[in-house]
Amino acid sequence: MAMSPSSQPESGSTHRIYSRKQKSLGLLCSNFLSLYNRDGVESIGLDDAAIKLGVERRRIYDIVNVLESVGVLSRKAKNQYTWRGFKGIPKALEQLKEEGFRGIWVLLMESTVLDDDDDETYSNPNTGSQSETLNSNITKSSASSKPDNRREKSLGLLTQNFVKLFLCSDVDMISLDDAAKVLLGNAHSSSIMRTKVRRLYDIANVLSSMRLIEKTHHPETRKPAFKWLGVLEKLDNTCSDQPFTNETRKRSFGTDITNTSYKRNKVDLLPENDQKQQRMPLKKENLKSEESMSNLDQDPKRCSKSYKFGPFSPTTVLKVGASQQKNARQAHDWESLISTYHPQYHNQALRELFDHYVEAWKSWYSEVAEKKSLEQVP
DNA sequence: CCTTCCCGCCATTTG
DNA sequence: CAAATGGCGGGAAGG
């Protein structure tokens, strides 16, 4: 009993008690950030991070994936990441914004692709629209329909799509539940939803620790939700790269960077704290007692039909607007196009979100189109 | 009870 | 092939 791993600023006798809070991704992210957000840091080794932070490798992946999605890091090579810092966030967000709006355009055009023709009217059952989602998934424009379902479900992509929700609409405050519904697009209720929400909780926690978002409560509905804070523009001189100072007196209880490790259940015993001992016991046990029960329906991938984007492809949307100045005219068509679009959202909140989304998109589009046409046509 | 969400099994992808 | 990566959801901590 020489020393306890971490000295909790509370409880004088109740030690050794497992606490979920000290193992949260949010706290881990804070520690990760304070560990690497300093001069001289160029690259980060995952092993190094795991050791220094005293956590399992798995957790590092979680953190790193969302950080990369927002531009703080970028994968350099296996096991190696390049540190970009908070200064990398603005650019990344800008990109996401553009992608997000482009996504809406695709969605709208997609909805236009009904009726017409005649034969082959099989695609119209209750399945309704397959509207991918408000996310864009420009699959590199390669013909290969690589079943990259892995990527589609990645934490990284989810993070980006979640962020787009804020960037591409002017609604502030979105509940994870609504976010999940929107990002899921179709009905997909049940387990799919639950898993999605679990992921969103993870993401929200790290984004919160970065102070990009903040948890609040909906004014009326006591429901918890998150509001976007973004990279707050509070600095005046010097190109600082962090929302606040390093020693943010905000709320970090991060007294010690090294995350102490107590197993969740099982008593821990062993005051052993050799900052290195974290090996997983050869748990070769087969305790598998769960079979896939969700395998008959839900097939979000089956919808990738060859879209019929009028004359252009979504990837070139931006350039199109510049061509001719018939934007004004088009804007009108969009109005009808939008009204024609029937969001199958049976939820008020989602419909509202969608409206804000579209509205923000319209102004954004015309803004970009204008800018484009100006720098062209000399 | 319901919400939050950590843990780590094990499928996949990489090298 | 091993190692690195990272879905995924059980089930326990926290209101």
Image: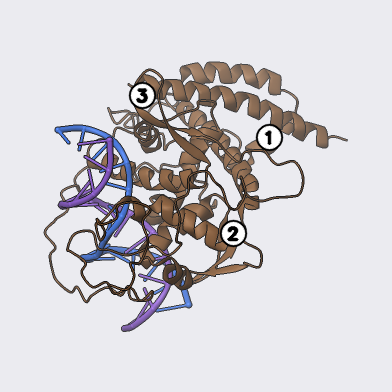
Chain colours: A brown, B blue, C purple
Q: Secondary structure at mark 3?
A: loop
Q: Secondary structure at mark 1?
A: helix
- Disc 3 and disc 1 on one polypeptide chain: yes
How packed mark 2 is, by other alpha carbons closer than 10 Å (few <14, some 14-19, many 20 or more), is: some
Q: Of A39 and A98, which appears nearest the observer? A: A39
Do the residues under discs 3 and 2 have CB atoms within 8 angstroms? no
User: Tag 3: residue type?
Assistant: Gln
Name the residue located 41 percent from the left edge and 34 percent from the top edge.
A131
How packed mark 1 is, by other alpha carbons closer than 10 Å (few <14, some 14-19, many 20 or more), is: some
Give the quarter of the image for residue B6.
bottom left
Q: Which mark is residue A37?
A: 2
**Vertical order, A323 against A29 (above or below):** above
Q: Earlier in the sequence, mark 3 or mark 2?
A: 2
Residue A45 is situated, as x and y percent measured from the top left of the image, at 51, 71
Q: Which mark is residue A320?
A: 1
Residue A376 is situated, as x and y percent measured from the top left of the image, at 82, 37
**Which quarter of the image is occupied by the N terminus of chain A?**
bottom left
Which residue lies under the disc numbered 3?
A344
Judged left or right of residue C8, residue A338 is: right
**Nearest to viewer (mark 3 / mark 1):** 3
Q: Secondary structure at mark 2?
A: loop
Judged left or right of residue A133, residue A37 is: right
Disc 3/disc 2 C-alpha distance (Å)? 44 Å
**Nearest to viewer (mark 1 / mark 2):** 2
User: Tag 1: residue type?
Assistant: Val
**Which quarter of the image is occupied by the C terminus of chain A?**
top right
Q: Of A290 and A84, which appears nearest the observer? A: A84
Disc 3/disc 1 C-alpha distance (Å)? 29 Å
